[in-house]
Image: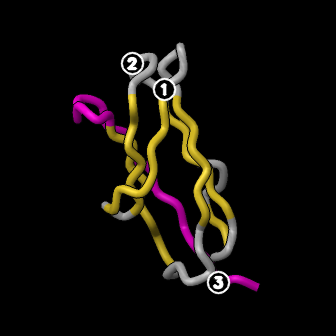
C-alpha cells in the first residue's frame, strides 16, 4: 500500500508481486471486486484507486487475486476522518 492510513477523499495505491507476466489481476476492496490490473514482465502489479469521501472510517482490506484464483495477496489500510 502507498499509505498505511489516509483520510477519506484521498487516493491509495496497492502493489503486489508473484503473478504471471501478463496475468489479469482483480482488485477487491472489502470483498467487492472493483478494478483490474495486468502484471508486468516481472509479475508485479500496481493499481491506484480512490478512497471516496463517503468511505467508512476504520480498517479496510484490499485483495489482489489472479483471474484463475491461483494467486492471492491481501493487505489492509486505515481510513481516518477527513479534515
Asked if the residue under mark 1 is in contact with the one under mark 2, i.e. CB atoms within 8 Å, the reply is yes
**Numbered badge on residue 81:** 3
Q: Which residue is mark 2?
A: 20
Image point 29% across, 30% down: which residue? 71
Dot 2 lies on which element?
A: loop
Whole-percent x and y of residue 29?
41, 60
Left or right of 83: which side holds 22?
A: left
Residue 76, how many percent across, how many down? 46, 57
Along the line of sight, which residue is nearer the eye, 54 or 80? 54
Give the extent of the magenta segment. Answer: 66-83
Q: Residue at x 61, y 50 (%)?
A: 48
Mark 2 to mark 1: distance in Å? 7 Å
Q: In the picture shown, does residue 6 fall above or below 14?
A: below
| Rendered location of residue 37, percent (x, y) | 48, 38
Please tell me how crowded label 3 is: few (under 14), some (14-19), or many (20+) other residues with Cα within 10 Å. some
Position of residue 42 relative to residue 3, above or below, is above
Choose between 22 and 82: the one closer to the eye.
22
Amino acid at each position: 500500500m502507498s499509505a498505511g492510513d489516509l483520510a477519506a477523499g484521498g487516493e491509495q495505491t496497492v502493489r503486489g508481486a508473484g503473478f504471471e507476466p501478463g496475468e489479469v489481476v482483480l482488485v477487491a476492496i472489502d470483498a467487492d471486486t472493483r478494478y483490474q490490473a495486468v502484471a508486468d514482465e516481472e509479475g508485479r502489479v500496481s493499481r491506484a484507486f480512490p478512497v471516496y469521501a463517503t468511505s467508512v472510517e476504520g480498517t479496510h482490506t484490499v485483495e489482489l487475486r489472479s483471474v484463475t484464483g491461483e494467486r492471492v495477496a491481501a493487505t489492509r489500510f486505515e481510513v481516518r476522518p477527513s479534515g
